[in-house]
Amino acid sequence: MNMRIGGLASGMDIDQIVKDLMKAERIPLDKLKQKKQTLEWQRDDYRSMNTLLLDFRTELTQMKLTTKYRARSVTSSNEALATATASSAASRGSYTISNVTQLALLPIG
């Protein structure tokens, strides 16, 4: 049988006082643990955001290099007289045919 006499018969509860002191001593440590957890969450969020931004940048680079996004179109004011085609590597611009010296002959056949 284990018997305790609190406070050497002074009426003080020594065990509770020690527990309270230990609890008070742990408060700074608990705060540091909370701050550490918060910083770890922030770090993880920054890493996630960096990954998303890198993926976005890579996608933009691919889009810039893909001919699908550099498609060129050609229009003519009179399709019966002149037509043209342009590849994705063609420079943007506007061209005018102002003087025709000879008509092209179409093969018969």
Image (tube, rainbow, N blue to C red):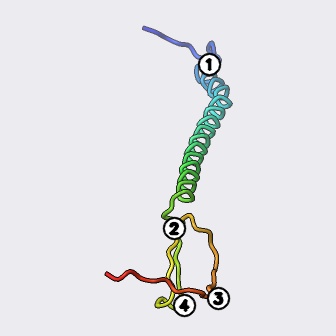
Disc 2 from disc 4: Cα separation: 20 Å
Q: CA distance from mark 1 to mark 4?
A: 101 Å
Please state, as top left, top right, bottom left or bottom right, where the N terminus lies in the image.
Answer: top left
- Give the amino acid at mark 2: Ser
- Among numbered discs 1 and 4, the one appearing first in the sequence: 1
Residue carrying label 2: 87
Nearer the observer: mark 3 or 4; the answer is 3
Indicate which disc, 3 or 1, sits on the residue closer to the N terminus.
Answer: 1
Taking the spot 51% from the left edge, 91% from the top edge, the residue there is: 78
Which residue lies at the image location 64% right of the left edge and 88% below the top edge?
98
Residues tagged 1 and 4 counted as in contact (Cβ below 8 A): no
- Amino acid type, residue under disc 4 in the picture: Ser
Numbered label attached to residue 1 = none
What residue would you read off at disc 1? Answer: 14
Q: Residue at x 53, y 66 (%)?
A: 88
Q: Please state which of the two labelled residues, at mark 3 or mark 1, is closer to the viewer.
A: 3
Other-residue count near label 3 (Cα within 10 Å), few / some / many at <14 / 14–19 / ≥20 = few
What distance separates the C-alpha of mark 3 from that of mark 1? 107 Å
- Secondary structure of the residue carrying numbered label 4: loop
Element assignment for label 2: loop
Q: Which residue is mark 4?
A: 77
Q: Earlier in the sequence, mark 2 or mark 1?
A: 1
| Residue 98: mark | 3
**At numbered mark 3, what does the secondary structure look like: helix, strand or loop?**
loop
